[in-house]
Image (tube, rainbow, N blue to C red):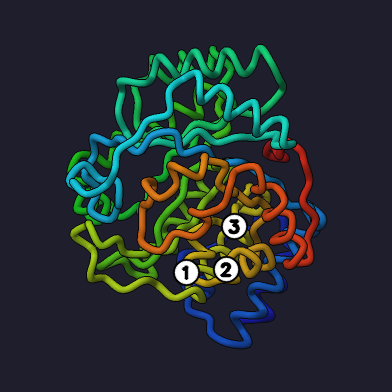
Amino acid sequence: MFTHSIRRYSLTVNKVYSLSEIKEMLLLEEEEAFALYEEANSLTEKLFGKSIFVRGIIEFSNVCAKNCLYCGIRRGNKNVKRYHIGKEDLKKIIMDAHNDNFKTIVLQSGEVDVYDNDITEVIEYVKSKCDIAITLSMGEKSREQYIEWKNAGADRYLLRIETTNRKLFENLHPDDDFDNRLKSLMTLKELGYEVGTGVMIGLPKQTEEDLASDILFFKENDFDMLGVGPFIPHNETPLRNIKSVNMSMVLNFLSAMRLVTYDTNIPATTSMATLDKEGREKALNAGANVIMPNYTPQKYRESYKLYDNKICTKEDAEHTMEFTKKTVERAGKVLVLERGDRRR
């Protein structure tokens, strides 16, 4: 059975996997799929113990110049209420997160350039006040902008590739160029950021071979954090009628990604819990070692919906850590209040 191969692979540091081996893992079902999750979890606990790192996400703006076909805050959605949190309010929110024991925050927004200088000021201010890791997730920028933010004190950058299938990427992102996305990721690595990327699972015309190629791409480029998001449709996008992917494929991908990339940081995401009410707990037992709760002020959360039925839009930020701790404990893990830098 393939299960025996999984067990053998998980004990091998930096084993080189073939495309066919990864594809086979993605197609596992029932008992063999559960064996895959168990081996990925065993490897994760070998590397990190039962520790789960936490990053607080602050969605500070839903203003976006891009028109990606799957995204609820795309430029073409005229029914979303646009907002932007000003720099002084953003400074306060980050300091509140620090006071609530977050050691890492993620500043996430739509893609526009008009607020870039404000973010430089915010980074410099926060770094002068406390030791908190700052991750940016603001899309493609110029090399000069990446340098400015790095010099200001930014530690990490998340830039999802969404798919390594060039044609599929360009069909989904009418304003983007695949080669430029690759160039941006390589520039971020060169500049010394911890770099995160990731893909969406369940996109129309996406194949298991595409997904296996995504995982090989992650391994070859040794990214520091890898996210996997299930496709969930938004009713104000061109993909509104496409069905969501099933959770088993998400878990298969996550576990395969853990076994192949070995020691990278992998989050259990909000979208997983939207797809399956126990999605984050399942992910934390299938290879994930990070959880990323929403620390955005409650009044803005309804307006930052990349997909329909997003959970946690009614919670207050002040209770975020408490809710997160309970989620992690339900998974039999331990929330640790550390920066959670990549362990090499």
Q: Nearer the viewer, mark 1 or mark 3?
A: 1
In this orientation, does residue 181 appear? Answer: no
Image quarter hosting the C terminus: top right
Q: Amino acid at mark 2?
A: Gly
Residue under the image location 51 percent in, 25 percent down: 90
Q: Residues within 10 Å of mark 1 (few under 14, many from 20)?
A: many
- Dot 1 falls on a residue whose secondary structure is helix
Q: Quadrant of the N terminus?
A: bottom right
Q: Residue drawn at (71%, 73%), measured in percent from left and top? A: 38
In the rendered image, which residue does mark 1 sit on?
A: 275
The disc label shown at residue 279, or none: 2
Q: Disc 2 vs disc 1: Cβ atoms closer than 8 Å?
A: yes
Residue holding disc 3: 268
Which label's residue is closer to the chain start, 2 or 3? 3
Tell me the kind of residue under disc 1. Answer: Leu
Secondary structure of residue under mark 2: helix
As measured in the structure, the alpha-carbon distance from the residue carrying label 1 to the one carrying label 3 is 12 Å
The crowding category of the residue bearing disc 2, from other C-alpha atoms within 10 Å (few below 14, some 14 to 19, many at least 20), is many
Say whether residue 70 is left or right of residue 10.
left
Give the percent coordinates (x, y) of residue 282. 63, 70
- Disc 2, disc 3: CB below 8 Å? yes
Relative horizontal placement of residue 75, taking residue 53 as reference (left or right): left
Residue at 40% from the left image edge and 63% from the top image edge: 309
The residue sitting at 70% across, 70% down in the picture is 39
